[in-house]
Image: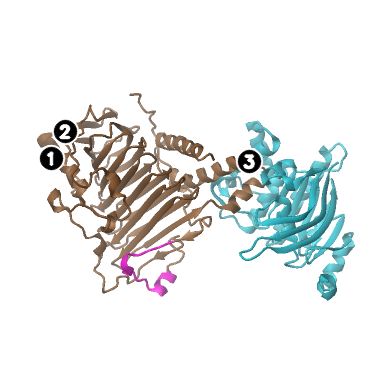
Amino acid sequence: MAALPGSTDCAVPEAALPEIEDVPSVSTTTESVIDGSLVVDPAINAAAGGPNGLTEHSHVGGRTVNPSATPGAHMTRVVSTDVADHPVPTSKFESWRFTPLRRLRGLHDEAPLTGRAGQDFEVEIDAPETVSVVSLAGAAADWVRGSSGEHPVDRPAARAWNASPDVFLVDIPAETVVDGPVSIVFRGLSAENAAAAHLVVRVGHHATAQVTVTYEGSATLTENVEIVVGDGATLTFASSQEWASDAVHLSHHRLRVGRDAVLKHSVLTFGGDLVRILTTGVYDGPGGDLELLGLYFADAGQHLEHRLVLDHTAPHCKSRAYYKGALQGRNAHTVWVGDVVIRPEAVATDTYEMNRNLLLTEGCRADSIPNLEIETGEIVGAGHASATGRFDDEQLFYLLSRGIPEPVARRLVVRGFFTEVLVRVGIPTVVDHVNEIVERELEVAGI
Amino acid sequence: MATLEIRDLHVSVLTDEEPKEILRGVDLTINSGETHAIMGPNGSGKSTLAYSLAGHPKYQITSGSVTLDGVDLLELTVDARARAGLFLAMQYPVEVPGVSMSNFLRAAATAVRGEAPPIRKWVKEVKSAMGDLSIESEFADRSVNEGFSGGEKKRHEILQLGLLRPKFAVLDETDSGLDVDALRVVSEGVNRFKALSAAEDEAGAGVGVLLITHYTRILRYITPDFVHVFAAGRIVESGGAELADELETNGYVRFTGAGASA
């Protein structure tokens, strides 16, 4: 495998980034709060406008919880490694109601997870010498499984936990600065035998690294990904789903952010028949900074689902979620659900989440649900924004009126739509690659 | 020498209910080098005329014709009209998030000129044009019009005028929302392009300008050759610059009374 061109300085300076704000180009705005449990004192909310730079909908320092609702109720779920503890999901489950379960090929139920490395999939690794990337089996695998301290919250993840024979471990030693990205490619060879996989990325304290995982080919895969960032460490991580059109992929990313650690986590989903990625994040101590980025582009018939659950349990932590998606073609369906809970002890939390969807053609559907639950008034800021809209005719007219031909104008707008998130990803090779994919997607649309 | 000819133009705006007629027979001929001011009260249809010429899909041409050097402009798409030499400086320039001003300008210049301008020459050209309009260089990296103040947006419209070098420019309420300093900078930009286009024109005529405005103050900086009073969807009176002075003194009452709309 050819080494990915490394880069010694991949960080995008914060100041150079455009501030992501609410874009008037999208025509509708939806917000929803689970069971109406979020009650914002309008006076406090109004007073919050401005200083934190949050717009559209912000909550700062309010008494927020409806006494009739249990705090954190919607996040209470079965947490267990034992498959028997997890019922088979049905469409009546809140967290599965959007997923077309029939297309899961039994991953959520009883489908045998017999896919094996070398036969049904292969894994390629490209890592600098300072990084240890190993496939562990037996007792060694058992030892690293669960490194995040977080366990499966649903049946497919619990099944993957028990069925995956090996655990891939990417281990960045403490105080190491790794040049260039560690690259892992998971290549599916067949979608016939369902497979289970488990990846652990462990970054020692005060280390700095970039890790990319690329999924391609055909597969029926259920997977656990654990990412543990030690105190004071910085990890830039990107997972790129570039599957063939017959792939089904369920994954649960569990993130643990150490004290004063910085984790940038990008999920870039373009391929596959059905991809559903649940990302849950927790903080190990104060001062953690977590940025969750997502881009997706759904074509006809594709179901791409991204769910975030961020649990602010430590004080002085920051989180940002920026997810953007484009859809084109009949029955292209995307789902984004972002749950953020600020626990009573998480004072001085600063959180903001945003999801925007661009519908390029008729016949596609984007569901977007941000949920924010605040259990302390002592916070820096908390906000969310969600909007789904069609191509903005006024933007198009403006570009056309300058002589720019329509196909060029449309590309400019769609590329611009993705750019806001893409410039934050922070791994140049990934950014270039995603740009190429977006160009291809636009060709599919005849744009 | 080119001519923009508007004949008996009738335009309706598409609303949720039924189309509503806004323009009721506009006749106007603009030759290269001429500056025509169209003045009229709010709601008289001035902006509708501007957008109809550019081809905004919201407006439906029900009858009449618009030709640029004999070419039927109304048969052309929006982008083709711009490439044919028409430019509209908008009253409310649109924000396009994620598309940098520099990318946008280059895409537009490439389209209008028929080929990508050589990069070094282009960078110099843009830099100098921005300097002329007192636009900070950081704006090149910002998204098109995003977060720009009213004055910054108008400066960028005139920046595009100078870079795209149209045969005819429609300036829709370019003076609105500008303070005196900004008004001067923007007006000087228009005059500079008028002079430059005349110097480059073999016939010495240069750009033809259609200046749409509610107030006369911009006419103190950009001198019109003709002033037309617009009311109830058509031109009701035409004259020289002195007509603007009369409007300044007496307002539009004479044209908006019962007699004008009949």
What amino acid is found at the position of numbered circle 1 in the picture?
Trp
Residue A403 location, quadrant: top right
Crowding at dot 2, Cα within 10 Å, few <14 / some 14-19 / many 20+, comes out as some
The residue pinned by badge 3 equals A405
Mark 3 or mark 2: whose residue is earlier in sequence: 2
Magenta range: A30-47
- Residue for point 67% across, 47% down: A401
For marks 3 and 2, give the one nearer the viewer: 3
In three-dimensional space, the C-alpha distance between marks 1 and 3, rounded to whole angstroms, equals 59 Å
Quick one: A249 or B91, which is closer to the camera? A249
What amino acid is found at the position of numbered circle 2 in the picture?
Leu
Percent x, y of residue A99:
31, 51
Among the chains, which one is cyan? B
Quick one: A77 or A378, which is closer to the camera? A77
The residue pinned by badge 2 equals A136
For residue A66, side relative to residue B13 (left or right): left
In three-dimensional space, the C-alpha distance between marks 1 and 2, rounded to whole angstroms, equals 9 Å
Identify the disc placed on residue A143: 1
